[in-house]
Amino acid sequence: MDFAPTEEQELIRRTARDVAERLLAPRAAARDEDGTFPEAELRELGGLGLLGVTVPEELGGAGADVVAYSLVMQELARVDASVAVAVSVTNMVAELIGKVGTDEQRRRIVPAIVSGREVAGAFALSEPQAGSDPAALTCAAVRTGDRWRITGAKQWITSGDHAGQIVVWAVTDPGAGHRGITAFVVPGLRHGTAGLSVGRLEAKMGLHGSTTAQLVLDGVEVGDDAVLGGVGGGFRLAMMALDGGRIGISSQAIGIARGALEAAIRYAGERETFGQPIIRHQAVGNMLADAATWLDAALLLTLRAAARKQAGLPYTREASMAKLFATEKAGQICDLALQVHGGYGYTRDFPVERAYRDVRVTRIYEGTSEIQRLVIARELIKAAGA
């Protein structure tokens, strides 16, 4: 079994690291402090193909594989998790439309997303009362002639106020359960879409450079050409996208934790107590050793899930295992990194404070840790034939 990246994977990882250091690192702390959305940065990342890593080249993407996408996410999140989450969701949207969209949707929408012309994509599934349970959606789409009229509210929508294209899930047949949910591609606010507005922007603990919006759809009208994946096929699309999205969030968590661990190692090598660098104290060394071991284990779980997805193999269980372990351990790594910094780690003068805040949400979005355990248990039961 070969754990080394291919030449192509290493090239795109290096590209992501270089652009992260050059473009993102200089203003990462300022974006966090000011809450500035990285529109210019996303456009430049689009020009490098990083908004559509797995999207075919003929649609404007990088045409790379899922492992390469994971490596890209790790490199971006290592420097700026706010930019990374916007990139992750945009990749999800572009990949989904590229896979299940009509030829017309693929040609018209995907290149505009992955190039950065649309700035970002948004994934509007969650609602105020429907987060982990998509079957509880109340946002409804009613056909009127040859048009659909969408009414409802969506919650926790990353980049929802900036995205040029938004995939919106709505109930089209209330009596059909899961089979009554349909996905629509809706032009975002920058297109002046009638009936679409922002209810509120969340004031969050972390990821201050990424906006999280409540979107209100008050009779938003779209045509049949906005239906994605067929009427009634929305639930299947959501589950498919979330499985892949969990690989992205695992990778984001690994990147945040890697940045925090690297900062802790540097600090521990410079900070002296009792006549020697604190990294030589056994207590500190043990903390760093544990963190490095957890990080490698999380990476291997995540790359396994990515490789299985790329190979067309079932990967639901593997993606949930990766997300559960990577996000839980990333939280512990950021906590240890802050502890190594002592009182300085609690100040905004050092990047571990931001990492500590940013990493916390990875255990929540794209399915909480509790949901991941349910998914894993369900897959184990299925495999056992019980």
Image: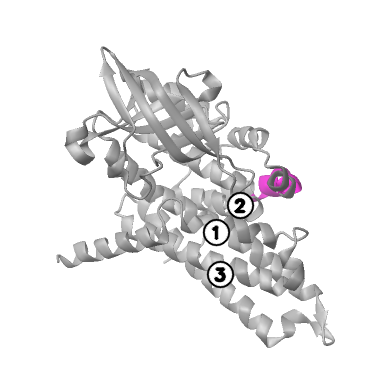
Are the residues tagged 2 and 1 within 8 Å (C-beta)?
Answer: yes
Q: Nearer the viewer, residue 99 or 83?
A: 83
The magenta span reads 17-28
Residue under the point 78% across and 59% down:
349
Assess disc 2: are there few (<14), some (14-19) or many (≥20) residues with their C-alpha within 10 Å of its C-alpha. many
Instruction: Give the SS element for disc 3.
Output: helix
Give the residue number, with chain letter if any, for mark 2. Answer: 206
Q: Label 2 is placed on what type of residue?
A: Gly
- In the displayed structure, would residue 127 be above or below residue 349? above
Gap in Å between the C-alphas at discs 3 and 2? 16 Å
Q: Main secondary structure of the magenta part?
A: helix
Mark 2 vs mark 1: which is more N-terminal? Answer: 2
Judge whether residue 286 is colored magenta: no
Number of numbered discs: 3
Instruction: Give the SS element for disc 2.
Output: loop
Q: Label 3 is placed on what type of residue?
A: Gln
Residue under the point 71% across and 59% down:
351
Instruction: Give the SS element for disc 1.
Output: helix
Give the residue number, with chain letter if any, for mark 1. Answer: 360
Mark 3 vs mark 2: which is more N-terminal? Answer: 2
Q: Label 1 is placed on what type of residue?
A: Arg
Q: Nearer the viewer, residue 278 or 99?
A: 278
Q: Nearer the viewer, residue 244 or 152?
A: 152
Left or right of 15 in this view: 322: left
Gap in Å between the C-alphas at discs 2 and 1? 8 Å
Give the residue number, with chain letter if any, for mark 3. Answer: 332
